[in-house]
Image (cartoon, rainbow, N blue to C red):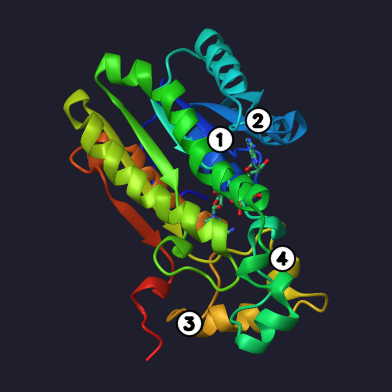
Amino acid sequence: MLPFKIDLSDKVIAVTGGGGVLCGEMAKALAECGAKVAVLSRKQENADTVADAILASGGQALAVSCNVLELDSITAAYEKISSQLGDCDILINGAGGNSPDGTADLETVDSEDIKSQLDKSFFGLTAEGISFVFDLNFTGTVLTTQVFAKAMSEKGQGSIINISSMAAYHPLTKVMSYSASKAAINNFTEWLAVHLAPTGVRVNAIAPGFFLTKQNEQLLMGDNNTPTERCQKIIDHTPMGRLGKADELIGALLYLASEDASGFVTGTVMAVDGGFNAYSGV
Ligand SMILES: NC(=O)c1ccc[n+]([C@@H]2O[C@H](COP(=O)([O-])OP(=O)(O)OC[C@H]3O[C@@H](n4cnc5c(N)ncnc54)[C@H](O)[C@@H]3O)[C@@H](O)[C@H]2O)c1
């Protein structure tokens, strides 16, 4: 159920991470507004599932496998979309995620921990682990934007919507590389908005708070479906007192996608977070 409807008929919209939970919802909402949606996912079957659901409900969609870390793969995806759906009008950079390899096991350490549990601290992180997470979220967004936004810039219209996180503003304990990468996404959103402003291409981001998805269900809810200690900390720090639902991102998405609604909006990062970012904890 859409919060409101905008007219996206004839618009071609590419959604990376479109086979995932949050961006799958976004892909479906955009299709419901009439867009031709390219659902990009690293795994073809995940893209197929979302594209099939869109087609089954009468929308237009194309499933495309794409690894946002490989320029050849992004270029091949772009060419497939251009030839089968037409020139891309809007790009949603949703592919991203975290990995234990970019995450410290301990929230904080004292001098004793450094001696006895070095591997579980910041000092145990490897260059490979840090780069893997950073590149997935940051470099993947930058490379995909280079490929997709060039024609938009030549044409003089288009919109890029990056997916940031609350971790961009205040790094989450343990979550080192992901937090840094999402901070870089906010910075890049502003940088590119300025760089491309004379072309007419707008660049914005959505920063979701904490949303329950299949991927983080175990981490947030544990085995018996009650909030884990970490999840309870998140809820306690969210003035609205709960986690978000995927469809609660759709209003911000449609606003930023609509030239009529946000035609003079570029370089913004819009938090959809139940007040998490506004709350100091006191
Ligand atoms: N779930 C949350 O609470 C939350 C909060 C803030 C931000 N986010 C961000 O929202 C976006 C979607 O997250 P989600 O929670 O729906 O997770 P998800 O795991 O369901 O979706 C992530 C998608 O990215 C894709 N992906 C991963 N590596 C890729 C690669 N190399 N190339 C192409 N695609 C790749 C995955 O296949 C998946 O489809 C991510 O950028 C995430 O960081 C999520």
Asked whether the residues under the numbered discs 2 and 1 touch, taking CB atoms below 8 Å apart as contact, a structural biologist would say no
Q: Residue furthest right?
A: 223
Read off the residue under disc 3.
237
The amino acid beneath tag 2 is Ala
CA distance separating discs 2 and 4: 24 Å
Q: Considering only vertical position in the picture, is 132 above or below 166?
A: above
Read off the residue under disc 2.
51
Q: Judge: label 1 CB < 8 Å from ligand 1.
A: yes
CA distance separating discs 4 and 1: 22 Å
The amino acid beneath tag 3 is His
CA distance separating discs 3 and 2: 36 Å
Read off the residue under disc 4.
217
To which quarter of the image does residue 121 belong? Answer: bottom right
- Pinpoint residue 11: horizontal percent, then vertical percent: 41, 23
Q: Quadrant of the C terminus?
A: bottom left
Read off the residue under disc 1.
16
Q: Residue at x 41, y 20 (%)?
A: 10
Q: Callout 3: 10 Å neighbours few (<14), some, many (20+)?
A: many
